[in-house]
Image: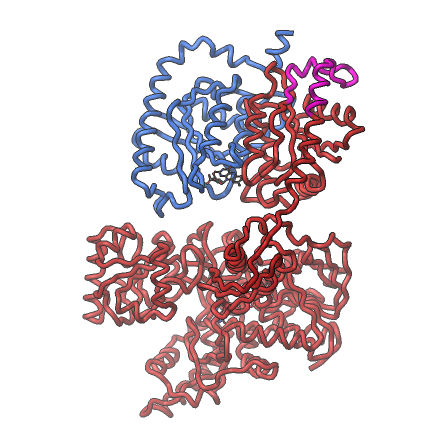
Chain colours: A blue, B red
């Protein structure tokens, strides 16, 4: 199985990046997880032309060719970081590779609450009509106190948290397989690809 | 009333902009609305703080001055546009201008339900603790089908919509008044008295006394005897002063002393709590704001010195001794640079003094070894000195064949040892060694530097001769009192009491030139004001670049790898500024690829003095597999390279007996570090192995083998030179260590007069360099104690040259 992991921040040090790196190593026998950075994408500014800049296109291609996507998001001010939002805006505004793509959301944060609000926002965002990703329901992996969560080898210190992730990841791989069976028949696929807020309203004019 | 309206998108065309513009005109009789755009707001990045950029500062200042803020947001993918989110992240990071501000949310969107989802998200974001805005509840103004809502003049077509917007706005004005009343600062009432509290400082607990009257913090007294003198004392002066002056706990930490700064703030907060008041109220009180930025300030002097470390203050004192004016610019709040961190003793051969001490075991052997060096391996310029030294040594050995003898030394021995100690090859096989004329200058004049310092007022402990770590020979002159700070304290006192000026927190950013000569510097002062300093000469004494990992990596030709997150023993000020300043005016560099690492540093802080530091004969070093990997008696760079080859992180193993030979710690500190997880302790080797995640059997075997080598007096694996104790008495300890950057031998190319040279070998008029900023002397490896000798010698030389060249003063 081929997966893409998106590091939801541009910070030089990120425990979310560490979490993805851990998953990459730990689940290597089940899935090939490619880690993507978004720090170097241009900031989204709603240009007139809906062309993807090269870096965005590259990310879109990587997503296109993957069986599923894992977002690892920090929480900034009760929501996802602007830089991650910007990356998603680009994808929704140009090639829309997330349509019908199975998605798992994980998040690491310094405090104990984890990234619950950011994850809830991210789910709502990914369900927007121009994204229509298939976010896996019922699973919400939150790693609190993330600065203390990894040992020197980059492994999760807390066994219970490691087992929870094993279970969630297993569920996700099953979800991906299941969705692959359903989505080819999804008749809304083309419609979604064409969706546009302005067209929608213009049509009703 | 004055409001700021923020257009929540950076798109060229926006109905939200249109909505705000409409509000601006429609409500102009009731309030002034200034519209701000997101266009130039950079993407938020916590690793690249841009809070001080003009764009963000503009938002901060305008929002702070306004009575309230109106945010007009589109909905992008069910949430906030990234551009708006980015701005709010900046406004929740280092500055918090929205804290307590009344905010009204409006939104225009294409679809009928308008921007309902984004408005909920935006409320949550504005409510986050870092933002802290007061969002008006209820009254959601959602403008659906925005593309049909406005007429040609930009007015809202529907009168129902206008009425609703007007009622929302009226409510917002009322809301603003209510919030204003809420924001009236909380009264604070203390139970008057003097409170004894402790705060955690850099080196442990700091006892403090805080005196409170009914409504004021009157006085803060700190017992700072345990803190490193010279580094933290600025924090002890400044933080209490700012707290008392502003009656606030919102004060900035002093750079270079942030732990101590926070320790003091926390201590006062504790006292406030004990006095029955809420410290959070004081934390929310406004900072003592600096005065507005003045225009460029011009200053005039004879000589300007960049950097108030050992070399800089020495040069300044020397200039003052000739009756000329001097201005020392120092970028940090405290003077002293790395010099205050130094162990203290400086090398200078003083045979008449050293003679009174008996030779110790092994010294004769070391001398004999020197005479046995094959002359062909000595570089030609050093050969005559080498031969003369051999004669001196042979005479000495002859004279003392049948007796223990006295401690031998000579300028020549100092010179040849500096040369041999610095000779290295880099990864490409290039050989480097100290430039002869510079090494001669250093070793010929080091003793004069000791004598000059004595005249200035530095007292040396003549009763002992020491060998600084990594020095090879006992010729260290140790100042009385506090190590490196002893020099700085006296020099600073001398400079300020003889009419010199030291400006701290003044960062030199550029050298000014006129027709190829250096005529001054530009600098940024405490409150970011620009300074232009005009002078006859500039002396660079800004230290090395061991705290600048990027620069180390850029030039490195010696180490196979330097980790991105490597720590340093240096002050964070050592970023190679002088090298950048001088190369910008054509200076040449020498030996930049060679840096020195301290192999046994704390992996988290770079400090030397955490964990258990024991004499090298008791070092047992194991790698992350639990195996020994090096001769623990090796030189600093052998240990460092071996550590790098083993993944940098390694452990110093100790048992209860070895622990007793540690020279850096106390039982209380040990317990505290074990508790904090920075030092490992276990009753069995197996348990220790599990704690540091190595295979227990491997560790047990390593220790068993090592102990058998100690018994046999021979280490067939790594040939450790000397042993003392075995590892056998529980509890056992493991101190995690990593190499940290320590010294940069390379730097500006200078001549024996400390003139800065171009690649063509000519001196740059008006420019001099002394101390760690200059290169050529220590080459591939600096001997312990030679740096202090260097900075005090070349500091004086730089001043002497500047006086003679530019001010026509001769000694
Ligand atoms: C932990 C430690 C222990 C050491 N022990 C010894 C020892 O025992 N013996 C020995 O001989 N050597 C020792 N050294 C090395 C020695 O301390 C330094 O090499 C020496 O102090 C350098 O002196 P300096 O005057 O060149 O620079 P510093 O004393 O480092 O001073 C440079 C000053 O310039 C300032 N500065 C930098 N850039 C600017 C700018 N742009 N504008 C204005 N000011 C600027 C800095 O803030 C600093 O105050 C040790 C070093 C360390 C870090
Ligand atoms: C501007 C900013 C806002 C933040 N807001 C929140 C927040 O609302 N909730 C939260 O749990 N953490 C917040 N944090 C801290 C994050 O927990 C932490 O930076 C991040 O989630 C950890 O992930 P990372 O290691 O990948 O950066 C914020 C950090 C920044 C820089």
Hey, which quadrant is residue B39 in on the image?
Answer: top right
Q: Where does the image place residue B476, in percent across and percent down from the top left?
A: 47, 79
Nearest the viewer among B243 and B530 is: B243
Q: Is residue B166 magenta?
A: yes
State which quarter of the image contains the C terminus of chain B. bottom right
Q: Where does the image place residue A156, in percent across and percent down from the top left?
A: 34, 41
Nearest the viewer among B210 and A115 is: B210
- Residue depicted at 57% across the width and 44% down the height: B48
- Whether residue B3 is situated above or below residue B490 in the rendered picture: above
Residue B93 seen by the camera: yes
Residue B592 seen by the camera: no
Residue sticking out furthest to the right: B29
Q: Is residue B788 magenta?
A: no
- Residue depicted at 57% across the width and 25% down the height: B118
Q: Is residue B748 left or right of residue A107?
A: right
In the image, which residues are magenta? B141-168
Q: Where does the image place residue A159, in percent across and percent down from the top left?
A: 29, 40
Hey, which quadrant is residue A72 in on the image?
Answer: top left
Q: Is residue B458 left or right of residue B465?
A: right
Nearest the viewer among B163 and B298 is: B163
- Whether residue B418 is situated above or below residue B89 in the rendered picture: below
State which quarter of the image contains the N terminus of chain B. top right
Hey, which quadrant is residue A134 in on the image?
Answer: top left
């Amino acid at each position: 199985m081929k997966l893409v992991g998106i590091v939801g921040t541009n910070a030089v040090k990120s425990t979310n990046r560490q979490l993805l790196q851990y998953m990459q190593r730990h689940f290597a026998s089940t899935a090939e997880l490619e880690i993507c950075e978004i720090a170097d994408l241009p900031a989204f500014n709603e240009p007139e032309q809906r062309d993807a800049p090269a870096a965005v296109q590259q990310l879109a291609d990587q997503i296109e060719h993957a069986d599923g996507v894992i977002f690892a998001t920090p929480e900034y001010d009760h929501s996802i970081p602007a830089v991650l939002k910007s990356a998603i805006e680009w994808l929704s505004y140009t090639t829309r590779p997330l349509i019908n793509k199975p998605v798992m959301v994980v998040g690491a944060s310094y405090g104990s609450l984890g990234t619950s609000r950011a994850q809830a926002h991210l789910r709502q965002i990914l369900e927007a009509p121009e994204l229509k990703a298939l976010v896996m329901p019922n699973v919400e992996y939150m790693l609190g106190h993330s600065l203390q969560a990894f040992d020197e080898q980059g492994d999760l210190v807390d066994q219970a948290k490691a087992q929870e992730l094993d279970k969630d990841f297993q569920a996700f791989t099953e979800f991906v397989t299941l969705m692959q069976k359903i989505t080819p028949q999804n008749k809304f696929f083309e419609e979604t690809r064409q969706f546009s807020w302005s067209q929608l309203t213009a049509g009703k004019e | 009333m004055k409001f700021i309206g923020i257009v929540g998108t950076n798109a060229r065309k926006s109905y939200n902009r249109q909505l705000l513009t409409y509000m601006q005109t429609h409500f102009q009789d009731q309030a002034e609305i200034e519209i701000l755009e997101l266009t130039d707001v950079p993407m938020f990045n916590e690793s690249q703080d841009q809070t001080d950029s003009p764009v963000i500062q503009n938002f901060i200042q305008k929002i702070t001055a306004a009575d309230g803020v109106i945010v007009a947001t589109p909905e992008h993918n069910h949430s906030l546009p990234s551009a708006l989110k980015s701005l709010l992240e900046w406004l929740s990071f280092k500055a918090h201008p929205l804290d307590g501000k009344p905010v009204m949310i409006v939104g225009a969107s294409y679809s009928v339900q308008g921007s309902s989802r984004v408005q909920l998200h935006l409320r949550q974001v504005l409510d986050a603790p870092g933002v802290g805005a007061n969002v008006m509840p209820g009254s959601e103004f959602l403008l659906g089908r925005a593309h049909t809502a406005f007429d040609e003049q930009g007015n809202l077509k529907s009168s129902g919509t206008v009425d609703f917007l007007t009622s929302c706005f009226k409510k917002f004005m009322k809301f603003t008044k209510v919030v204003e009343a809420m924001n009236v600062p909380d009264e604070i009432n203390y139970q008057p008295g003097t409170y004894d509290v402790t705060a955690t400082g850099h080196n442990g607990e700091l006892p403090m006394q805080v005196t409170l009257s009914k409504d004021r913090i009157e006085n803060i007294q700190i017992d700072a005897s345990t803190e490193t003198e010279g580094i933290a004392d600025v924090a002890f002066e400044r933080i209490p002063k700012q707290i008392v002056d502003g009656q606030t706990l919102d004060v900035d930490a002093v750079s270079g002393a942030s732990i101590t700064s926070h320790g003091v703030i926390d201590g006062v907060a504790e006292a406030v709590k004990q006095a029955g008041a809420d410290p959070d109220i004081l934390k929310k009180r406004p900072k003592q704001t600096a005065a507005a930025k003045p225009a460029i300030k011009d200053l005039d002097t004879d000589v300007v010195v960049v950097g108030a470390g050992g070399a800089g203050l020495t040069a300044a004192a020397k200039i003052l001794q000739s009756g000329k004016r001097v201005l020392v610019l120092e970028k940090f709040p405290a003077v002293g640079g790395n010099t205050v961190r130094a162990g203290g003793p400086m090398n200078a051969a003083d045979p008449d003094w050293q003679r009174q001490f008996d030779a110790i075991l092994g010294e004769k052997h070391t001398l004999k070894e020197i005479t046995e060096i094959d002359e062909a391996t000595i570089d030609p310029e050093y050969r005559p000195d080498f031969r003369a030294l051999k004669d001196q040594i042979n005479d000495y050995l002859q004279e003392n064949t049948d007796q223990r003898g006295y401690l031998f030394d000579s300028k020549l021995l100092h010179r040849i040892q500096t040369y041999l100690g610095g000779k290295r090859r880099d990864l490409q096989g290039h050989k480097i060694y100290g430039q002869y004329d510079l090494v001669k200058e250093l070793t010929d004049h080091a003793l004069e530097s000791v004598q000059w310092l004595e005249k200035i007022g530095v007292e040396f402990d003549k009763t002992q001769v020491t060998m600084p770590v990594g020095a090879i020979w006992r010729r260290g002159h140790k100042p009385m009192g506090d190590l490196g700070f002893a020099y700085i304290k006296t020099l600073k006192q001398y400079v300020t009491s003889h009419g010199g000026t030291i400006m701290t927190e003044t960062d030199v950013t550029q050298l000014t030139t006129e027709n190829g000569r250096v005529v001054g510097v530009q600098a940024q002062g405490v409150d970011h004001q620009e300074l232009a300093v005009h002078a006859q000469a500039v002396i660079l004494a800004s230290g090395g670049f061991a705290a600048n990992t990027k620069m180390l990596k850029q030039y490195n030709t010696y180490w196979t790898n330097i980790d991105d997150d490597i720590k340093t023993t240096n002050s964070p000020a050592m970023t190679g500024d002088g090298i950048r300043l001088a190369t910008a005016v054509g200076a040449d560099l020498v030996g930049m690829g060679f840096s020195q690492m301290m192999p046994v540093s704390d992996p988290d802080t770079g400090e030397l003095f955490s964990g258990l530091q024991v004499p090298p004969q008791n070092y047992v070093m194991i790698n992350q597999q639990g195996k020994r990997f090096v001769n623990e008696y090796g030189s600093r760079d052998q240990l460092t390279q071996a550590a790098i080859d083993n993944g940098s992180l390694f452990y110093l193993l100790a048992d209860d007996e070895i622990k007793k030979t540690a020279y850096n710690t106390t039982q209380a500190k040990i317990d505290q570090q074990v508790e904090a997880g920075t030092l490992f302790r276990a009753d069995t080797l197996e348990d220790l192995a599990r704690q540091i995640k190595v295979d227990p059997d491997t560790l047990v075997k390593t220790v068993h083998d090592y102990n058998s080598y100690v018994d046999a007096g021979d280490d067939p694996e790594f040939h450790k030179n000397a042993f003392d104790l075995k590892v056998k008495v529980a509890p056992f300890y493991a101190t995690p260590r990593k190499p940290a950057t320590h010294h940069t031998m390379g730097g500006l190319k200078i001549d024996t007069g400390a003139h800065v040279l171009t690649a063509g070998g000519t001196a740059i008029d008006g420019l001099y360099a002394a101390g760690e900023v200059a290169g050529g002397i220590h080459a591939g490896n600096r001997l312990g104690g030679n740096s202090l000798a260097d900075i005090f010698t070349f500091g004086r030389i730089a001043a002497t040259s500047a006086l003679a060249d530019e001010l026509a003063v001769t000694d």
